[in-house]
């Protein structure tokens, strides 16, 4: 215990003597020691832990001729006013404080002489115009390890005539603005460096409109932007921003400048391809410039590769416009190629309707759902058409017209379910380098496919793997088609009289049954044909000359507008389109509602009544039904169609409507074949001056 007391006593004596010396003051405050240390040889004054302003001022007054001041770890919130004591100050280091605002308003005396300002490791979030204007002699500014997210435009003006280096490492900046280099507008002999590595920078902005014409061969600008978030460089955008019209001669102005953007996550896709071309072209001019060493961050297969060394065909990007569902469309910008890759997720049984537009298209579909090949306009531009290993059993004969004549096209239809191919291929004119594969299909070898053998033999250089084009049926079963003798390509015709008689009688019985079923289910068959076959879109339907103002008047409740809009749009897009009358749109101003209703019914070939619970509750809708019903009863040539939009409240159905529902056919909106049934009830409208007969010869009466 005594020993500990003596030790404490000696420490107190040492502290007292040190304080009296004047060259070194030590104060114990919150376990931090105040330090005031001056070096006469360099005129450098170091102050640490200057929490007590009186002590700091006393130190400054003692060494007021110091040229360099390091004032660290003193919890400064602003640049202190008492710095004016040092009237010869040139270098100022205020790092490791808590400064949030850069302002020299209270220290004007030192502004004009200060050449270096260090504000590292503070709490500066933004620098605004005017904050640095007084520092006319400032050459170097250090702002490392702040939370700096923005340097507002106009901060670095031409008033900072001496600035030549700005250190912005480890901050939160997202852009670099050309205002940092505003000196270039003052002199063509500018030397300037900016280090903004380890930020979140994605690109440049140009608030002061510097152009390529403002840069000369004597200009030296060095920018370090390593370890940021730069993913691409939009060459056309930056050329426009800096008014670069003739890149090769104009970019020579940057011969003494360099930009280091290494260690950024560049995406080597279509957007970066122009930069890659530029790097390849200019590499030999300045091989040491770090810009030529930038590497790809993504895609994974190119990670770490120098951008200038990536092959042009490897710069790809996704295309979404007109890309078929569940397919992946990729563009190779260097050759103008789009690849459409459809995996087993492709569920359609025919080729996609749409495809991205390009001069060259590669299509690759591997799906057991693809069963038919129909012609598509985009096939004119297909260079590789790979539909092998699908389930194709039918090819539209006219597909030859869109596949024929394309140079260097590869057509792979092997390993499908084809028993034959259209005979239009017999006159298929192969172009130079064009290839077709059809092996791996179960071809029938009979009298109908003999032409295929001759066709194969005459196109050996275009149709590959002929030894694998095997007969699946016929006398030549299991052999290559080209090796089966012509005499073996026969069709079975030796039926006995009994077989012929059975077939004839059976056919007659089937025809009679079909006729009976057809007569009994005439309407259902008509609806099925209209809904499933476009070719029968106009079958079974009457044609009417248009001699009234409207084709269809739609009676409805305004509360059902959404459904009515759907029905109206479909009818107006019909070919030929129907001219629709809607009450709130087409009623004439100045007339009563009842007059307008009666006029609309009388001016329309068909009245379409859309009944819902909303309709039943509307007095005007009930009136429209009664007027239409009266006209229908008065003139049986008048067409009235009733649509039930939902389950009706039977208590609200009025007598006239109930009688009509009990005695006439109506259509439910929820019916799967609603549109087909509706079209079956509507006549095809033709101009009144048309020479077409009133009724199509296809119409069943």
Image (cartoon, rainbow, N blue to C red):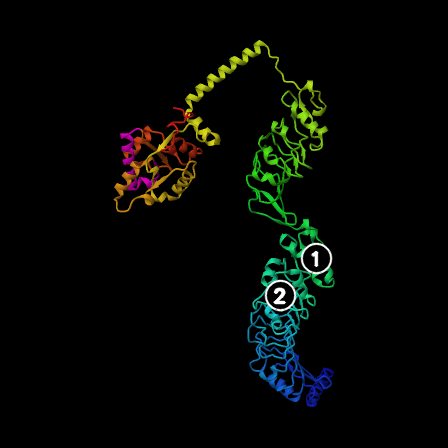
- Quadrant into which the N terminus falls: bottom right
Residue 619 location, x and y as percent? 28, 41
Q: Are marks 1 and 2 in contact (CB under 8 Å)?
A: no
Q: Which residue is label 1 attached to?
A: 281
Res 124 seen here: yes
Above or below 663: residue 240: below
Task: Between residue 210 and residue 89, name the one nearer to us.
Answer: 210
Mark 2 closeness class: few <14, some 14–19, many ≥20 residues within 10 Å: some
Q: Secondary structure at mark 1?
A: helix
Residue 562 location, x and y as percent? 39, 44
- Quadrant into which the C terminus falls: top left
Part of the protein shown in magenta: 607-636
Which numbered marker is on residue 212? 2
Residue 574 location, x and y as percent? 43, 37
In the picture provided, is 8 more to the left or to the right than 146?
right
Res 417 seen here: no
Is residue 635 rendered magenta in the image? yes
Above or below 218: residue 18: below
C-alpha gap between disc 1 and disc 2: 19 Å
Residue 424 location, x and y as percent? 60, 29
In the picture provided, is 340 more to the left or to the right than 255?
left
Is residue 171 rendered magenta in the image? no
């Amino acid at each position: 215990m005594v020993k500990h007391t003596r030790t404490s006593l000696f420490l107190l004596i040492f502290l007292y003597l040190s304080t009296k010396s004047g060259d070194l003051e030590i104060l114990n405050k919150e376990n931090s020691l105040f330090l005031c240390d001056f070096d006469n040889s360099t005129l450098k004054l170091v102050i640490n832990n200057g929490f007590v302003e009186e002590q700091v001022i006393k130190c400054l007054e003692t060494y007021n001729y110091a040229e360099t001041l390091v004032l660290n770890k003193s919890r400064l919130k602003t640049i202190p006013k008492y710095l004016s004591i040092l009237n010869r100050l040139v270098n100022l280091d205020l790092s490791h404080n808590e400064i949030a605002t850069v302002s020299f308003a209270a220290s004007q005396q030192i502004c004009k002489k200060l050449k270096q300002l260090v504000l590292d490791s503070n709490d500066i979030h933004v620098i605004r115009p005017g904050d640095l204007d007084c520092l006319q002699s400032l050459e170097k500014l250090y702002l490392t390890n702040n939370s700096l997210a923005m340097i507002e435009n106009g901060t670095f003006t031409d008033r900072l005539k001496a600035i030549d280096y700005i250190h912005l490492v480890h901050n939160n900046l997202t852009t670099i603005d050309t205002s940092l280099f505003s000196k270039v507008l003052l002199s063509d002999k500018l030397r300037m460096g900016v280090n903004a590595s380890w930020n979140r920078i994605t690109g440049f902005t140009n608030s002061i409109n510097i152009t390529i014409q403002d840069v000369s061969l004597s200009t030296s600008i060095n920018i370090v932007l390593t370890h940021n978030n730069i993913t691409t460089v939009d060459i056309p955008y930056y050329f426009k921003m800096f008014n670069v019209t003739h890149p090769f001669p104009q970019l020579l102005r940057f011969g003494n400048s360099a930009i280091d953007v290494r260690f950024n996550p560049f995406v080597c896709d279509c957007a970066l391809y122009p930069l890659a071309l530029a790097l390849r072209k200019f590499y030999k001019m300045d091989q040491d410039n770090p810009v030529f060493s930038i590497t790809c961050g993504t895609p994974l297969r190119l990670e770490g590769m120098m951008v200038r060394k990536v092959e042009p065909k490897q710069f790809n990007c996704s295309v979404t416009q007109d890309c078929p569902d569940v397919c992946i469309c990729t563009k190779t910008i260097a050759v103008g190629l789009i690849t459409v890759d459809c995996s087993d997720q492709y569920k359609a049984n025919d080729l996609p309707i749409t495809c991205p537009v390009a001069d060259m298209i590669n299509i690759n579909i591997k799906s057991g759902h693809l069963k038919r090949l129909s012609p598509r306009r985009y096939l004119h531009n297909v260079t590789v058409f790979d539909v092998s290993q699908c389930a194709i059993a039918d090819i539209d004969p006219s597909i030859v017209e869109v596949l024929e004549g394309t140079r260097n096209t590869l057509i792979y239809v092997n390993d499908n379910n084809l028993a034959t191919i259209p005979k239009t291929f017999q006159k298929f004119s192969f172009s130079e380098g064009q290839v077709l594969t059809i092996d791996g299909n179960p071809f029938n070898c009979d009298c109908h496919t003999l032409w295929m053998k001759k066709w194969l033999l005459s196109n050996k250089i275009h149709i590959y793997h002929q030894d694998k084009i095997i007969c699946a049926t016929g006398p030549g079963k299991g052999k290559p088609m080209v090796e089966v003798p012509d005499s073996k390509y026969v069709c079975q015709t030796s039926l006995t009289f009994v077989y012929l008689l059975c077939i004839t009688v059976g056919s007659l019985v089937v025809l009679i049954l079909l006729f009976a079923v057809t007569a009994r289910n005439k309407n259902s068959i008509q609806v099925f044909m209209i809904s499933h076959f476009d070719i029968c879109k106009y079958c079974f339907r009457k044609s009417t000359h248009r001699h009234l103002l409207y084709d269809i008047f739609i009676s409805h409740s305004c509360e059902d507008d959404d459904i009515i809009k759907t029905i109206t749009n479909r009818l107006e897009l019909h070919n030929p389109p129907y001219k629709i009358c809607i009450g709130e749109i087409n009623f004439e101003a100045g007339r009563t509602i009842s007059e307008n209703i009666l006029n609309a019914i009388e001016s329309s070939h068909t009245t379409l009544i859309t009944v819902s619970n909303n309709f039943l509750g509307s007095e005007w809708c009930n009136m429209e039904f009664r007027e239409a019903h009266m006209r229908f009863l008065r003139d049986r040539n008048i067409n009235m169609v009733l649509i039930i939009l939902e389950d009706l409240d039977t208590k609200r159905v009025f007598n006239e409507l109930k009688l009509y529902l009990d005695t006439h056919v109506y259509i439910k909106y929820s019916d799967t074949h609603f549109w087909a049934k509706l079209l079956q009830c509507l006549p095809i409208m033709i101009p009144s001056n048309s020479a077409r007969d009133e009724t199509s010869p296809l119409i069943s009466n």
